[in-house]
Amino acid sequence: KKSQAWSALFSEPMSDLVKRYTASVFFDKRLWRADIQGSLAHADMLNAQGLISADDLASIQKGMAQITQEIESGQFEWKLDLEDVHLNIEARLTTLVGDAGKRLHTGRSRNDQVATDVRLWLRGEVDELGVLLTALQKALVDVAEQNADTILPGFTHLQVAQPVAFGHHLLAYVEMFARDAERLVDLRKRINRLPLGSAALAGTSYPLDRERVARSLGMVDEAGRPAVSQNSLDAVSDRDFAIEFTAAASLVMVHISRLSEELILWMSQSFGFIDLADRFCTGSSIMPQKKNPDVPELARGKTGRVVGHLMGLITLMKGQPLAYNKDNQEDKEPLFDTVDTLKDTLRIFAEMAAGITVKPEAMERAARKGYATATDLADYLVKKGLPFRDAHEVVAHAVKDAIAAGVDLSELPLDKLQTYNPAIEQDVFEVLSLRGSLNARNLLGGTAPEQVRAQVARHRTRLG
Ligand code: ARG
């Protein structure tokens, strides 16, 4: 009894170890819906082209409907002997409908079939990720809006630099996630192209209507024209769409990881800027006082895994001769894991963002400690006519004296301040205040609360 599609040529059965080594069904069965969708589009086209009868098409449709129901209800029996999702479904179809099932593979190879399946599947996932990225951005915009006036010490080199609005800081992440979403929209165009019709590598002698298949699978360009691959060798062997996706996914995770690092720092007692809701934290089995930010820590860690998948896929491609090689079967687990990791992470971050408790007093206290308005004093002197470099030097002296005296610049009396430069007047105290510093940066992209509110409004319109 034949157990493999090609077994007439083989004089001995495959060894069990090799069977297990080469089989992909236990992970690629996840592509089943795309596989059936592709097969139905192919069968419909075969019939339209007179390559299979209307009866055969009807049998294939009926069989696939039953297989769908069997898989959905968990009754479908996946067989390792049948190697992958494609052969499992095709074998079951043939059991159910006989010769019509055997005609389905006319003008098709698993090479163009699997390339089509992965693209269909990934296209759907990219769309879901777009929705999740929007939800996360909205959650961050909400917190930003509530904190358009909240003063946070802005850091460079993790040293207090200048005060910024906490809302402004959060909107920086919204910008990152907005670009991530743009990248997904762009790369989706390159995912959404049809390999079917390329057959094993050279195309096929059957008069297939590739554009019809593309249209029925929704593989169309922005103008609504069918998007069909133009070179059969490239179509069956290219996985750069998957590499591009994991690269974009890696950037999403890098952004998540940067945010995670800040959440972790901010929640640390030494900062005490925020608290995360208990449901996102865990305790310690030994230290009763502990509440740990496990979720952002794990997200930071999982970034390594997604970046690893990018490295895996790009290395997988390197050095492969044209056209299809079995190496490409290794594209699936990294892709699946990337999608799973990203979806969970984005969902959890959208929820977690909504549960952040902000501690404005602690943020402001920290900003006051770091001479965060020193630049404002220099700018003040520039407005009084000093060249900026001289003003910078004058203020450095003032900061040095203030540090020695253990006070903030704004706590130095006016007559003391005037010893640094006689142009300094009473209005300097508004300039030296954190809020004055914030309000002064009222230009596009700046941290003034008015600008933050304008950005919040822009994001809301953009996000819908
Ligand atoms: N399971 C295979 C993969 O994922 C399907 C294509 C196999 N083609 C072949 N000629 N062995 O790449």
Image (cartoon, rainbow, N blue to C red):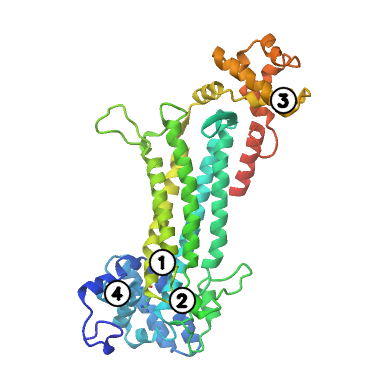
- Frontmost of labels 4 and 3 is 3
Disc 1 marks which residue?
316
Image quarter for ligand 1 = bottom left
Q: Indicate the quadrant where residue 17 lies.
A: bottom left
Q: Mark 1 Cα within 10 Å, few/some/many (few <14, many 20+)?
A: some
Instruction: Report the amino acid beneath label 3.
Output: Asp
Mark 4 near ligand 1 (CB under 8 Å)? yes
Give the alpha-carbon distance from disc 2 to disc 3, as whole Å. 66 Å
Disc 3 marks which residue?
390
- Frontmost of labels 2 and 3 is 3
Q: 248 or 45: nearer the eye?
A: 248
Mark 2: secondary structure:
helix
Q: Residue at x 37, y 34 (%)?
A: 278
Give the alpha-carbon distance from disc 2 to disc 4, as whole Å. 19 Å
Q: Is residue 212 visible?
A: yes
Asked if marks 2 and 4 touch (Cβ < 8 Å), the reply is: no
Mark 3: secondary structure:
helix
Q: Is residue 39 visible?
A: no
Q: Tag 4 or tag 2, which sits nearer the N-term?
A: 4
Spot occupied by residue 154 in the image (x, y as percentages of width and height): 56, 32
User: Which numbered marker is on residue 83?
Assistant: 4
Q: 70 or 162: nearer the eye?
A: 162
- Frontmost of labels 2 and 4 is 2
Instruction: Report the amino acid beneath label 1.
Output: Leu
Spot occupied by residue 372 in the image (x, y as percentages of width and height): 59, 25
